[in-house]
Image (spheres, helix red, strand yellow):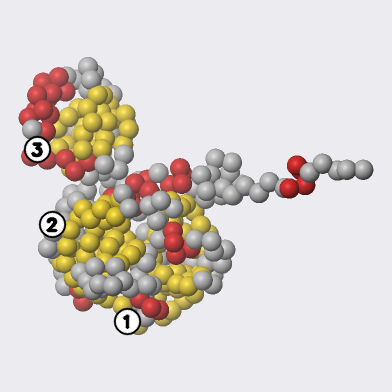
């Protein structure tokens, strides 16, 4: 139904418009128009006589008209710039929308599947521990500058945050604790937090690639790396049980990979080494009932991180705490 509707608009869309963006759809269809807004689950496109709202899962790629056009052999279609990861690119399918270059990386083509052992050796260095006076959780580094993702509930109400990174040198992992960590952005309702290591003379960190949970099928193998109950660098494997488990009004990935307290904020990977979710909770009275936030929500949060910027000095900050009213202001002095 959706495909037939889009094909019906192509006759208009093929009109030469210098400002038009190109939205590439599944089954080799496309829509040409002006992208008005991009949300986590849909994209609004002005095609001239109407505005189409296209579901994100129907889009394979977006070409922006104002993007720099690379030199090609007679092909003038604008292409997106792909970020380069320092490790071998990991896996699954083409991403819906390319990320902002330089902040986090995602593959734009299918990558080969590997064994869990090979992937742990390849990407395990990018998984970290997040420690606070109130407890600990997990996280993962998303770029070489030391930005990392974790759950909001891991750092909620905390002012002292440290991150333990396992640097690989000469085939061995050496633990390094970084205590100068700043909160960059938070979303309490999605349970997401973006942190940054800010100490001097930092190395170039190894980081993970962002995948696509939409591209996975129920029953595919996944694995998690984290620090359950403080047991750092624990690897658990399972399958994707469902992609649409509704809890508290939000959709989660459900997995049989074992998740326990301390896994919170850690990555859930597919078998190509891409992050497809952030583990954040489990059912305590059951086994093999773990849940993860889909990576599409993480990418939306990172792409719009300025809107979630954390600063108590910013009056527009949605999580700014105001001083409580003083009782003395409402008291009447009797003489």
Determine which of the numbered discs, if any, sits on residue 171 in the image.
1
Q: Which mark is residue 28?
A: 3
In primary-sequence order, the first of circles 1 and 2 is 1
Left/right placement of residue 233 relative to residue 31 reads right
Q: Residues within 10 Å of mark 3 (few under 14, many from 20)?
A: few
Residue shown at the point (17%, 58%) measured from the top left? 242
| Residue shown at the point (29%, 68%) measured from the top left | 283
Q: Which mark is residue 309?
A: none
**Residue 276, percent across and down?**
25, 58
Left or right position of 138 against 219: right
Local secondary structure at mark 2: loop
| Left or right of residue 334, residue 230 in this image | left
Front residue of 17/278: it is 278
- The CA distance from mark 1 to mark 2 is 35 Å
Residue 300 point in image, percent of width and height: 34, 46
Query: Viewer-nearest of labels 2 and 3?
Result: 2
Q: Which mark sits nearer the N-terminus, 2 or 3?
A: 3
The residue at the point 51 percent across, 44 percent down is 318
Whether tag 2 and tag 3 are in contact, CB under 8 A, the answer is no
Instruction: Please tell me whether residue 227 is drawn above or below residue 307 in the rendered image.
Output: below
Q: Earlier in the sequence, mark 3 or mark 1?
A: 3
Q: Quadrant of the N terminus?
A: top left
Residue 88 figure quarter: bottom left
**Residue at image mark 2:** 217
- Name the image quarter holding residue 42: top left
Find residue 179 and report its image quarter.
bottom right
């Amino acid at each position: 139904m959706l495909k037939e509707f889009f094909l019906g608009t192509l006759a208009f869309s093929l009109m030469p418009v210098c400002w038009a963006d190109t939205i590439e759809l599944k089954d080799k269809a496309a829509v040409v128009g002006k992208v008005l807004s991009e949300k986590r689950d849909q994209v609004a496109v002005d095609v001239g006589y109407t505005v189409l709202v296209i579901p994100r899962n129907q889009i394979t790629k977006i070409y922006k008209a104002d993007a720099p056009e690379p030199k090609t052999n007679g092909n003038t279609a604008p292409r997106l710039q792909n970020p380069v990861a320092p490790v071998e690119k990991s896996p699954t399918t083409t991403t819906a929308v390319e990320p902002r270059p330089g902040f986090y990386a995602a593959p734009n083509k299918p990558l080969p599947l590997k064994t869990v052992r090979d992937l742990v050796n390849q990407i395990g260095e990018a998984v970290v521990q997040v420690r606070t006076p109130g407890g600990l959780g997990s996280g993962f580094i998303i770029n070489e500058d030391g930005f990392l993702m974790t759950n909001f509930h891991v750092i909620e109400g905390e002012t002292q945050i440290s991150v333990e990174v396992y640097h690989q040198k000469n085939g061995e992992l050496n633990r390094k604790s970084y205590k100068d960590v700043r909160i960059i952005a938070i979303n309490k309702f999605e349970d997401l937090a973006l942190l940054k290591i800010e100490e001097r003379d930092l190395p170039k960190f190894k980081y993970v690639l962002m995948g696509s949970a939409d591209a996975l099928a129920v029953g595919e193998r996944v694995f998690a790396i984290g620090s359950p109950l403080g047991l750092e660098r624990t690897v658990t494997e399972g399958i994707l049980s469902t992609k649409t488990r509704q809890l508290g009004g939000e959709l989660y990935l459900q997995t049989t990979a074992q998740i326990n307290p301390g896994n919170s904020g850690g990555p859930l990977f597919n078998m190509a080494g891409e992050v497809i979710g952030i583990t954040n909770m489990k059912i305590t009275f059951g086994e093999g009932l773990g849940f993860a936030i889909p990576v599409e929500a993480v990418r939306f949060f990172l792409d719009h991180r300025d809107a979630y910027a954390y600063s108590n000095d910013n009056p527009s900050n949605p999580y700014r705490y105001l001083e409580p009213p003083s009782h003395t202001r409402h008291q009447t002095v009797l003489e």
